[in-house]
Amino acid sequence: MIKKVVLLLMSLLLTCEIVLSQKKIVILYTNDMMGRLKGEPAYFINRDFPPPLGNAASCATYIKEEREESMKKEYSVVLLDAGNCFGNPQVGGLEIGKTVEFMNRMKYDACAIGIYDTRLGEDILLDIYDKTSFPWLSANLKAKTRNECIGKLYKTIDCEGVRIGIFGLISEYGPIWVEKKIDKQFLYEKEMTRAEEMVSLLKENGCDIIVGLTNIGFVHDSLLADSIAGIDIIIGGGEGRGMTKPFESAVNHTIICRTYGNLSSIGRLELNIDEKTRKIIGYSGENITLFTEQYPPDIEIKKLIDE
């Protein structure tokens, strides 16, 4: 009997030690917003009686709730976007400005440049970058006239001793999706080549976890995950195809995730990090549909959108 009690106590102590040696990091992510800030009916749920979505205003509520929870339970929250923030280039400066203001208020940590974003043209993109409080990332997009990168190559974030390296990637097939007059402004470099270079660069910079914000589509995300070792997480965008749960590459164990776009949902990826190795030892993820009933619209963001 005493032997069983001792074994039970030892087991409990070992469990406590394992839990205490872990860090928790939550990554919230969006992709393919397409400027869809206003709430709208969720016809994809029920065509006859669609429940209302809050889009940006409900997204703000969710983000604020997660950050409040992180303060109580002492874990880090990172907020990222995988590009295509702006939809129709004809919507005008007012709607573009509201998207920028929404992202600034939510304090995004980084955003990838998407194909639809490049349709605005180089001058408008550079003006947008000057107005945002976070970096726009792309490792393989350059201005043709200057042969310089549009946006930044990468960003690093330190979360309680864990260094996260984040790089952006845009589809090398950009010319197919943009007008010729816009295509002349940009050079789209090879996805695989630049991704491999970024992994090496981020490792040289001491990054423990590497995240790719990719605007290349799910099929290319899967190829990237299987082809390039060292990318821990891919947050994808580029085609409006979402995932309810993360997908793990069988080859390199890269975690791939994305939302359904149009700000109908927000993604949440919870990472368990080994405190000694600073590597991912477990994860869970979900795609949260932004129903107004569950996440009442944030008053300040709703006012911004309705102005």
Image (cartoon, grey):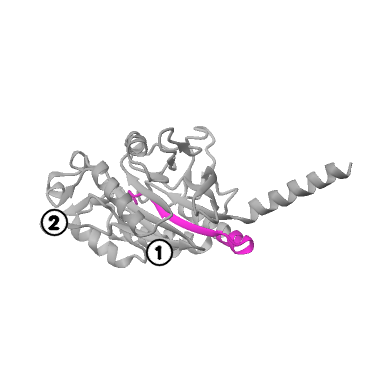
Instruction: Name the residue tied to disc 2.
Output: 147
Q: Nearer the viewer, residue 228 or 28?
A: 228
- Horizontal side of 184 relative to 98 (left or right) equals left
Q: Residue furthest front?
A: 3
Residue 116: in sight, yes or no?
Answer: no
SS assignment at label 1: helix
Check contact, mark 1 vs mark 2: CB within 8 A.
no
Amino acid type of disc 2? Answer: Asn
- Horizontal side of 151 relative to 268 (left or right) equals left
Q: Quadrant of residue 127?
A: bottom left
User: Which of the image's four quarters has the N terminus?
Assistant: top right
Q: Residue at x 53, y 42 (%)?
A: 286
Spatial CA distance of label 1 from label 2 is: 29 Å
User: Which of the image's four quarters has the C terminus?
Assistant: bottom left
Q: Residue at x 79, y 44 (%)?
A: 7
Residue segment shown in magenta: 67-86
Percent x, y for residue 266?
48, 48
Percent x, y for residue 104?
40, 64
Percent x, y for residue 10?
75, 48
Q: Nearer the viewer, mark 1 or mark 2?
A: 2
Earlier sequence position, callout 1 versus callout 2: 1
Task: State the mark number for residue 104.
Answer: 1
Q: Nearer the viewer, residue 142 or 304?
A: 142
In the displayed structure, 63 sits above or below 183; it is: below
SS assignment at label 2: loop
Q: Residue at x 51, y 58 (%)?
A: 77
Q: Residues within 10 Å of mark 2 (few under 14, many from 20)?
A: few
Amino acid type of disc 1? Answer: Asn
Percent x, y for residue 106?
45, 61
- Horizontal side of 131 relative to 241 (left or right) equals left
Q: Residues within 10 Å of mark 1 (few under 14, many from 20)?
A: some
